Amino acid sequence: MYFSSMTFLWVFLPITLLFYLAASHFGKNTAGNIVLLFASLIFYAWGEPVYILLLLVSVLLNYAFGLLLGLEALRCRRIILALGVAVNIGILGFFKYFNFFAIYINQALGREAVPLSHFALPLGISFYTFQAMSYVIDVYRREVNAQKNFFSLLLYISLFPQLVAGPIVKYKDVETQILKRVNTYEKRAYGVKRFIYGLGKKVLLSNIFGKYVDMILGIEPGQLSTGLAWMVMIMYTFQIYYDFSGYSDMAIGLGSMFGFEFRENFNYPYISKSIQEFWRRWHISLSTWFKEYVYIPLGGNRKGKLRTYGNLFIVFLLTGFWHGASLTFVFWGLFHGFFMIIERLGFGKLLEKNPVKLLNHVYTWVVFVCGWVFFRMDGLRKGFEMIKAMFIYQKGKHDVTSCLSLEVIAALLLGFLLCGILQTMVPKLKNALYNREETSVLQTLFLFAVFFLCIVSLSANSYNPFIYFRF
């Protein structure tokens, strides 16, 4: 079930919200949590009923690890932590990476020594596994108390707004909210506003870009003109941003409807002036997770320059691998890691001193657009073919004019302006978007218009699944 599906919009969400408000009125957060828990399990089981058992087993194991690590007299806490992390990574690794390694082992041996797994990838396993690990690690660090109520921990990990595609919510950020949050009219109104803006990003922008991206990338890169190659990758750059940031907006909005406050997951990454800044603005919950649970424990930047560069290499290798069991994702992660290291070696200081900041933006755009090539293409070979088409001029059988239309021009213009450019130029616009206290009459009318257009578009079955659902 997708947030942008008619079933969710007209059946699941209204019924869940109605029962939640009724339960909260009589039993406050405890009764409301029961409704949310049942709704979350139904939401997850909607598409993959069998994997609800895997989710429950994962939560049960982490609940046990948390209780053990919470014991004051326990002497083998490090062993329990290592076992907890190993179990989580083992579950994730089996379902997500088993075939990846099996294929290369079989190729190396020249025979099928390791039979391939036929299990489908469980929805959202990368997200809820990282949340579970953050809980276990934080209990070990004594930053949070072990949750003694199994159902409260289950609610934290399975909460449907952020279950399948984030943002990755750390337990310490919502520990008190699980039982002591206040659900006000202002929070629900703000939640509706954020949800509609996210829905608009997904349906009215990302889906349009996605339609043309899929069409153009169905053509071999060698047949695309250089201009069309750049255009399609810029379109994909906008598609993935409005897809994922739109989902995050909807998740934050849904959380607010039920009294939760989730941290922002995007902060206009496409206005960045360096790759370091880009990663402070893009998928913030993932980058901060790796920083807090991998980079800093490895030593961060405290043990010399070489160690720092090595730590960055490891973090971005894992970041790429987290996204998928494919060499293209690994390359994408290392590609960004390379520029992070280059900027730390001194290029970052040159960018800071550069008086022509437009060049900084151009550099950053070129890097992440080229990075998205490998994120999107099927295989490294096709990725390099697309890079060749972009940087070595070719006329190709298909050029920009063959794919240009008023819809494409309007989408590109809106995509460019709304990715942070307009919000930076007009701060009042940004403040209105994120204002939790009030919504003007004009903005309310605009929200109704956006929602109406989304429903019209969805009625034509023109939506596609969220990109990050497959991670």
Image (cartoon, helix red, strand yellow):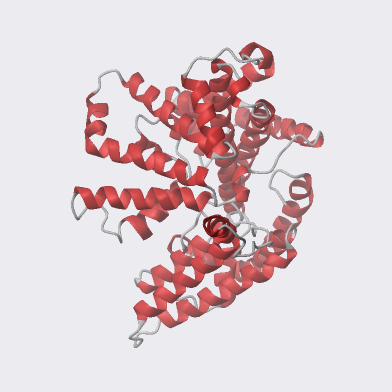
Give coordinates of residue 421: x percent, y percent. Answer: 46, 24
User: Looking at the image, which is closer to me, 289 or 22?
Assistant: 289
Query: What residue is at 47 percent from the left and 30 percent from the top?
Result: 370
13 left or right, relative to 183: right
Residue 427, x across and y down, in percent: 44, 27
Numbered circles on residues, count: 0
Query: Which of the two residues, 408 or 450, is positioned nearer the viewer here?
Result: 408
Question: Looking at the image, which residue is at 43% across and 64% down?
Answer: 172
Question: Is 107 or 90 nearer to us in this picture?
Answer: 107
Residue shown at 20% from the left, 54% from the top: 302
State the residue lying farthest toward the bottom: 73
Q: Is residue 408 left or right of residue 147?
A: right
Q: Residue furthest left?
A: 304
Residue placed farthest to the right in the image?
460
Residue 120 falls left or right of residue 154: right
Where is 68 relative to 320, above or below? below
Q: In the picture provided, is 453 more to the left or to the right than 280?
A: right
| Relative vertical location of residue 455 with respect to residue 32 in this rendering, above or below | above
For the residue pair 385 and 226, the one nearer the viewer reads as 385
Residue 183 lies in quadrant: bottom right
Q: Quadrant of residue 362?
A: top left
Above or below, 45 against 304 in this view is below
Q: Position of residue 119 (x, y in %)?
A: 68, 62
Q: Is residue 376 above or below residue 9?
A: above
Residue 38 at least partly seen: no
Q: Position of residue 16 (x, y in %)?
A: 72, 58
Rendered residue at 26%/33% (across/down) = 348
- Does residue 339 appear in the picture of this structure? yes
